Image (spheres, grey):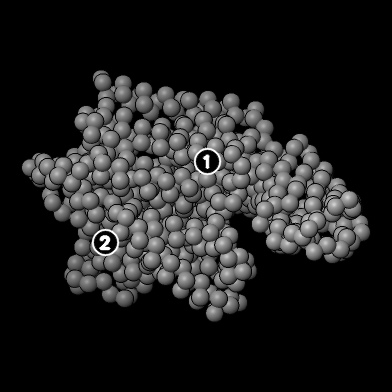
């Protein structure tokens, strides 16, 4: 049984610190989520555990972390569902060419550079219980991630969502997200296949069947939710209960199939009806609890696993710097060059590259999965968490430099004259 | 024609390169895996010390491994920092461990040196812990066996 008093104290402290640091980062012009990620690190061994080990042990005793993790995982399942509901194939309309080329390049270039980096890091930061292929595929995937929700938030806050840059970036990020999650599912499947009871062929055929059923069957069946919503103009508790049940069942199925519960939740979000009113109300209902209460728990849990103290010595900091540089060169460079070659001016292409380089929460999700399945070591985990923080932190100031506010409005005006419906992206962001 | 060429260059080449790297990387070797939980037995009790004391019975050693870098924790308390070279573990005392705060005029310096034996049933460690305080030097032999439940799917810990 969890010690309820400890759990409540943990949740209270985490929410308080997350809100405070989030507020501070908002004042610095950073998204709230950036502050919450840092808050998680501050509560872990890197700061609280280092400055006040007694308080840290009393507040986060090792035996209590399982419960904290379970709570945060439920939050993450709901969050991934919300991210899935944001993905709308409509986004790609009108921008298919630029979005497809830029998104593919912005995945494969960092993936390739990640694999190249893995070649160097494997003998130095891994061990012989991890196959090189698993290690390299994972590092490649971690380098290719773009934080779709954080990115959408930044675009909204900077009034860029309606601009040409915003539209292309959000479309690329959507394609990136789906592709990266598919690759990650494959990596998890490969790594786990050597250790779990479920045979590989069953996982493969089961996953393929499940995706097909969800896309061709469940997606159509769920249209009744939209119809019912449009008829009543509201989302009843029964409907919410049904949707939550579907999310949990979908997560359970993919977890049992040997991939991860997050994929099931994400997939359920993807197949949800995409009427903007329906999706907007649904997200509003889930947002408060998930984003304010449960997600900070996930950041804190990640922070508790992140120990900057593990990076002792010049060689470890060199590896960390190398990871950050490769991540930026791969994502920013790949997206910028491909956007430019697709016909965008250098300034816009640079802005797309800066935005695509945002890793945010999605990177933390991927890294935690990597640490859980044992494909990365604790020190490499810490280095990559720092990489996620740096790449997320640099987005806003760089974007401000490349796209001053005056330029946004010119872009938005240009898009409007192209005749795009103004509300196309209105409800696109999860408020993180 | 140009978009196709751009796509093939920017997407096709990295894909081919990735496959090449994955193939070439099969020959790479990483340090031996020692991470996880070990059950340690000392042949005699450790010498009295303010800094470090292990009971004569079995005790838990948790090793956190990142490549050749190791962080060893005895009973979640005393931490030793070290590395693995070949089949041997070498450690010294880590900063921030219990004993770092209990440093007296002549602090105990602890070294561990153990060799890994990979047997089919379970991995074993055999070596000595050396306690040095001033001119006094005590060596305590130790053996340890790796706990199976500590090994995660995929081979990590």
Instruction: Classify mark 1: residues with Cα within 10 Å, few (<14), some (14-19) or many (20+).
Output: many
Judge by depth and name the residue closer to the eye, B47 or B64.
B47
Residue at mark 2 to residue at mark 1: CA–CA distance: 40 Å
**Callout 2 secondary element:** helix
Q: Which mark is residue A320?
A: 1
Could you say where residue B130 lies in the image, as x and y percent from the top left? 85, 50
Could you say where residue A359 lies in the image, as x and y percent from the top left? 40, 47
Residue appearing at x 30%, y 59% in the figure: A27
Q: Nearer the viewer, mark 2 or mark 1?
A: 1
Could you say where residue A225 lies in the image, as x and y percent from the top left? 27, 65
Q: Which mark is residue A279?
A: 2
Query: Left of A79 or right of it: where is A233?
Result: left
**Callout 1 secondary element:** helix
- Which of disc 1 and disc 2 is earlier in sequence? 2
- In the depicted structure, whether residue A290 falls above or below residue B133: below
Judge by depth and name the residue closer to the eye, A104 or B82.
B82
**Can residue A168 be seen at all in this image of the molecule?**
no
Query: Left of A248 or right of it: where is B25?
Result: right
Taking the view exactly as shown, the residue that stands out farthest to the front is: B105
Could you say where residue A44 lies in the image, as x and y percent from the top left? 54, 60
């Amino acid at each position: 049984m969890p010690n309820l008093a400890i759990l409540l104290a943990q949740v209270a402290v985490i929410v308080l610190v997350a809100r405070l640091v989030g507020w501070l980062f908002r004042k610095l012009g950073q998204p709230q989520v950036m502050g919450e990620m840092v808050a998680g690190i501050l509560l872990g061994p890197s700061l609280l555990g280092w400055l006040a080990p007694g308080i840290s042990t009393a507040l986060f005793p090792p035996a209590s972390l399982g419960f904290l993790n379970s709570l945060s995982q439920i939050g993450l399942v709901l969050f991934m569902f919300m991210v899935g509901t944001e993905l709308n194939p409509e986004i790609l309309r009108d921008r298919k060419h630029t979005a497809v080329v830029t998104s593919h390049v912005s995945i494969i270039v960092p993936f390739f550079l990640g694999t190249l980096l893995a070649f160097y890091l494997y003998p130095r930061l891994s061990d012989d219980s991890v196959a090189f292929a698993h290690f390299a595929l994972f590092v490649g995937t971690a380098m290719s991630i773009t934080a779709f929700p954080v990115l959408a938030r930044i675009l909204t806050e900077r009034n860029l969502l309606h601009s040409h840059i915003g539209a292309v970036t959000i479309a690329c990020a959507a394609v990136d997200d789906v592709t990266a999650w598919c690759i990650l599912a494959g990596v998890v499947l490969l790594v786990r296949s050597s250790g779990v009871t479920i045979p590989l062929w069953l996982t493969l055929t089961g996953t393929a069947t499940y995706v097909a059923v969800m896309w061709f069957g469940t997606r159509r069946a769920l249209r009744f939710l939209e119809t019912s919503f449009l008829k009543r103009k509201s989302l009843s508790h029964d409907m919410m209960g049904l949707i939550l049940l579907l999310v949990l069942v979908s997560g359970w199925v993919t977890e049992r199939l040997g991939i991860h519960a997050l994929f099931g939740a994400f997939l359920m979000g993807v197949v949800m009806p995409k009427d903007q009113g329906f999706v907007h109300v649904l997200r509003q209902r889930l947002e408060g609890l998930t984003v304010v209460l449960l997600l900070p728990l996930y950041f804190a849990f990640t922070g508790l696993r992140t120990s900057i103290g593990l990076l002792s010595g010049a060689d470890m900091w060199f590896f960390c710097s190398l990871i950050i540089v490769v991540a930026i060169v791969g994502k920013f460079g790949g997206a910028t060059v491909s956007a430019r070659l697709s016909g965008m001016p250098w300034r816009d292409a640079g802005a797309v590259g800066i935005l695509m380089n945002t890793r945010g929460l999605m990177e933390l999700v991927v890294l935690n999965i990597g640490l859980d399945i044992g494909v990365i070591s604790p020190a490499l985990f810490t280095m990559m968490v720092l990489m996620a923080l740096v790449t997320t932190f640099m987005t806003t100031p760089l974007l401000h430099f490349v796209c001053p506010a005056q330029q946004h409005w010119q872009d938005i005006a240009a898009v409007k004259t192209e005749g795009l419906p103004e509300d196309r992206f209105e409800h696109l962001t999860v408020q993180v | 024609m140009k978009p196709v060429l751009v796509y093939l260059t920017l997407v096709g080449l990295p894909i081919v390169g990735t496959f090449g790297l994955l193939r070439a990387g099969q020959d790479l070797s990483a340090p031996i895996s020692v991470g996880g939980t070990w059950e340690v037995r000392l042949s005699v009790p450790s010498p009295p010390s303010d800094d470090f004391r292990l009971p004569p019975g079995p005790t838990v050693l948790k090793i956190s491994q990142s490549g050749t870098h190791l962080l060893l924790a005895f009973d979640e308390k005393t931490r030793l920092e070290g590395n693995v070279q070949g089949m041997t573990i070498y450690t010294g005392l880590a900063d921030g461990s219990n004993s770092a705060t209990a440093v007296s005029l002549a602090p105990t310096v602890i070294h561990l040196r153990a060799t890994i034996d990979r047997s089919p049933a379970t991995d074993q460690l055999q070596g000595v812990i050396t306690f040095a305080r001033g001119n006094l030097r005590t060596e305590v032999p130790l053996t340890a066996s790796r706990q199976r439940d500590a090994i995660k799917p995929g081979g990590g810990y």
